[in-house]
Amino acid sequence: MSTFVAIDFETADRGQDSACSVGLVRVEDGRIVEKVVQLIKPPRFAEGDLFNPAPDFEFTYIHGIKPDMVASAPTFAQAWPKLERLLDGARFMAAHNAPFDNGVLTKCCEAARLPKPAHRFVCTVRLARDTWKLYPTKLPNVCQHLGIALNHHEALSDAEACAKIVIAAEKQGVKL
């Protein structure tokens, strides 16, 4: 069984550097050993009010994160150095639709002038298709198939679901 970290980002707007939440789940020998979620103040943060929400929080309707929830949160540049320790000794990172989360991590690191982790990404969409021949392979579909509880678009829940998908695939003999 692999040591890996599952990751999920929620973003405030269409910019890949607009992370407003990140969930990370570390797995060692098929067991979840640590879970962390962090709200992040996105780079184009502007406080709104009850009647005039901030225009840069385009995706509140998806994840429920509002400007007031991140007003005192750290920026990515402040938060990532404390979170990155979870990657120590990990063979890879896993995400559902990994190109999205890899892209967010890349752009956030670039904007923060931080080095991007060199870990390869395993995509649990591809993993579910290859392992269980699942279609459609949206995260709720895969979780339903595997009996995994999910609060979709909550970063920690999505990351934990990804971790459990990888664990299930490895238990079936998939080598990653």
Image (spheres, helix red, strand yellow):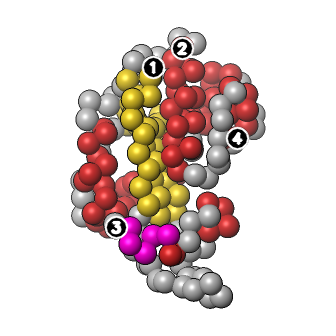
Q: Amino acid at mark 2?
A: Lys
Which one is earlier in the sequence, the residue at label 4 or at label 1? 1
- Residue 19 lies in what quarter of the image? bottom left
Q: Which mark is residue 140?
A: 4
Q: Which mark is residue 75?
A: 3
Please state which of residues 26 and 50 is positioned toward the viewer in this rendering.
Answer: 50
Which of the marked residues, 3 or 2, is nearer the chain's N terminus? 3
- Mark 2 and mark 4: span between their CA atoms? 21 Å
156 displayed left or right of 88:
right
**Would you name the residue on which mark 2 appears?**
171
Q: Is residue 5 left or right of residue 90?
A: right
Residue wearing tag 1: 30
As measured in the structure, the alpha-carbon distance from the residue carrying label 2 to the one carrying label 1 is 8 Å
Q: CA distance from mark 3 to mark 1?
A: 32 Å
In the picture shown, does residue 73 fall above or below 144? below
Q: Is 14 drawn above or below residue 158 in the view shown? A: below
Give the mark count. Answer: 4
Which residue is found at the position 57% from the left and 44% from the top? 158
Side (left or right) of 68 relative to 29: right
Give the residue drawn at x 38%, y 61%: 107
Q: Is residue 52 visible?
A: yes
